[in-house]
Structures are given as C-alpha cells and as structure tokens.
C-alpha cells in the first residue's frame, strides 16, 4: 500500500508541471509562431477594430481571383469586394479623358490593366472609347460619377456608410478640373465620406482652395524614407500616408504629436500587420492600407 501511495505522489508534480505548461504556452507559441500573452492579443484585437482598414485599389493591384470571383483593380466590383471583406475605406485613383471627364484608373495608359492588350493613353481617349473597354474581370472602367453613385446608392444600400479615398494623379489639368471632382462629391452628398489624396503640395493646395472642408491626405512615395515631421505643412492635409516600413512607433507618435493622422500602406502579411498593431495606443497608425483585404479580415478575426 505504501509503495502504491508513493508512486501516486511521484506523478503529482509531473501532472502539475504539464498543467502549468499548458496554461503558460499560448496557441501561437505551440504552433511555432511569435509568442504573445493574452494582454497583447486583446490589444491587437482592439486595434483591428480601432484602426481603419483601407482596400488598396479595392482588392489590390492587377486582376486576380478571390473565393472563386475574379476582380480587376480600381473597379466598382473590386471596391465592393473590399467592403464585403470588411474594408472601411476603398482607395481609388483618378485620371482624365480627352473630354476632361474623370475616370477611375491607376495608370495613365491601359497597358497593365488590360494585361498588355491595349496601350492607349487615357488622356487621348474619348469617354465613349473608355467606356467600351472591357477589363479582364468583365468590368468596365468606371467614371468618377459611376464610382460615387455606387458608394451612395449601390448594392442595395449595404455600403452607404463606407468611405472612399481618391488619389488625383499628377497630370496637367486646370483648377476647373479639380473643381469638377469636388462638384461630383457634393452632387452625391459624399463630402463626409470622401478623402482626397495627392503626392504633390501643389495638388493639395488646389484641393484646399476648391473644397477646404473635404479632408486631404499627403502620400509619400520615396522608398526607404519618410517626410520629416518638421517639414509637414499643417492645415494643408490632415493625414500622412507612408510605407508600412516607415510607420514606426516613434514616427507615428511624432506625427500624432503634431496633429497629423498616419496611414500605413503596403501592409500585406500577418507579420507586417502584427508589427503595426502590436503597440501601445499612442503609437497605432490611424489606417492600414492593404492589397490583401480578405486575408487581413481573417487575420483580425483570429486574434
């Protein structure tokens, strides 16, 4: 009897040790991923809710399949796909036709978006010619009016409270052309749901002169660098958009201290999302722009 009792007592510490390890080791660590404690997980879950998620060109550049559906960048279909997968914002780009109509297109020509089949410049095409182009996913190039109409009325009202970011590309145009952008935004009653973007101060000044009440974002494209906080212009824009690698905790804090919001773009993997969101509240970016909206949404749900 004594030997049996001693045998049972021997296994008690072993059992206690196994239980302790199961409590301490997180599922992430067990799976070989970065170890984080429960406090960190809760913080990232909150950050996923607090930080705006922006779908870059809708569901990302180019044409690709998502859950059995084909999407081409910067189309209404792609924007709605981003909203469906949880985006708060869909980011699109603007170029003008030969008739001065604004269309949603990232490049100045059709080469890349048509997979090399069409090399025409948008600025040399009439509105009818542009509308006749069929993109790889079967969509058409939307005009700005089409895009805003969808945001205001489309999809049976499912996305009416979502936002759009419109980047005006660098091209020769008159102030009246910028005014037409603003007039359309007001015509659809979307002045509270649209943010205008530019990479040049001259364009941002145009935006401010024709519609000072519509928010603006300064986007910085220089690789490996970010604009010095002291050189940013207060009042000209409210948000600064930089590559995710430049949106360090220190830089985000510096911009917040100067009154700017921060958008981190090109964050397309769980490692990058974790890096941006795994911070104290004062260092969180205000927006994350991603090409991988479905994956980002799924990753946030798993936290």
Image: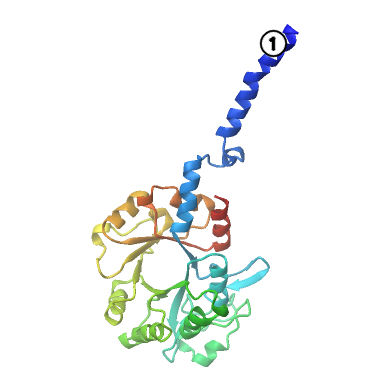
The N terminus: image quadrant: top right
Quadrant of res 255: bottom left
Rendered position, 123 above or below 36: below
Q: Where does residue 44 sit, x and y in percent of width and height?
A: 48, 50
Which color scheme is applied? rainbow
Question: Are there few (<14), some (14-19), or many (20+) residues within 10 Å of tag 1?
Answer: few
Residue drawn 52% across and 84% down?
120
- Check disc 1 and report the residue beneath it: 6
Q: Where does residue 133 sit, x and y in percent of width and height?
A: 58, 85
Left or right: 201 as drawn, with respect to 61: left
* Nearest the eye: 213 or 145: 213
Rendered position, 128 above or below 225: below
Q: Where does residue 210 sit, x and y in percent of width and height?
A: 29, 82
* Nearest the eye: 201 or 42: 42
Left or right: 25 as drawn, with respect to 202: right
Left or right: 96 as drawn, with respect to 175: right
Residue drawn 50% across and 51% down?
45
Residue drawn 45% across and 87% down?
97
Is residue 121 at least partly visible in the picture? no
Is residue 12 at least partly visible in the picture? yes
Residue drawn 57% across and 33% down?
23
Q: Where does residue 251 sit, x and y in percent of width and height?
A: 33, 53
């Amino acid at each position: 009897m004594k030997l049996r009792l001693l045998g049972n007592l021997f296994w008690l510490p072993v059992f206690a040790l196994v239980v302790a390890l199961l409590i301490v080791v997180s599922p992430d660590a067990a799976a070989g991923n970065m170890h984080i404690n429960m406090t960190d997980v809760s913080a990232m879950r909150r950050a996923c809710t607090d930080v705006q998620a922006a779908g870059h060109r809708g569901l990302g550049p180019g044409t690709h399949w998502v859950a059995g559906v084909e999407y081409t960048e910067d189309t209404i279909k792609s924007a709605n796909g981003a909203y469906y997968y949880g985006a708060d914002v869909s980011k699109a780009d603007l170029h003008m036709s030969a008739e001065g109509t604004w269309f949603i297109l990232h490049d100045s020509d059709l080469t890349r978006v048509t997979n090399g089949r069409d090399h025409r410049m948008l600025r040399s095409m009439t509105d009818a010619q542009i509308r006749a182009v069929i993109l790889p996913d079967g969509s058409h190039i939307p005009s700005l009016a089409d895009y805003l109409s969808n945001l205001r009325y489309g999809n049976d009202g499912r996305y009416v409270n979502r936002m759009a970011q419109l980047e005006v590309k660098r091209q020769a145009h008159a102030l009246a052309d910028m005014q037409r952008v603003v007039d359309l935004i007001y015509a659809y009653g979307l002045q509270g749901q649209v943010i205008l973007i530019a990479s040049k101060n001259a364009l941002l000044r145009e935006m401010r002169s024709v519609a000072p009440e519509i928010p603006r974002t300064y986007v910085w494209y220089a690789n490996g660098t970010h604009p010095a906080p002291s050189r940013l212009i207060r009042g000209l824009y409210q948000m600064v958009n930089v590559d995710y690698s430049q949106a360090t905790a220190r830089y985000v804090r510096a911009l917040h201290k100067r009154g700017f919001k921060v958008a981190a773009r090109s964050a397309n993997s769980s490692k990058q999302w974790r890096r941006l969101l795994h911070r104290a509240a004062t260092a969180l970016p205000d927006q994350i722009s991603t090409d991988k909206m479905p994956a980002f949404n799924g990753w946030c749900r798993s936290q």
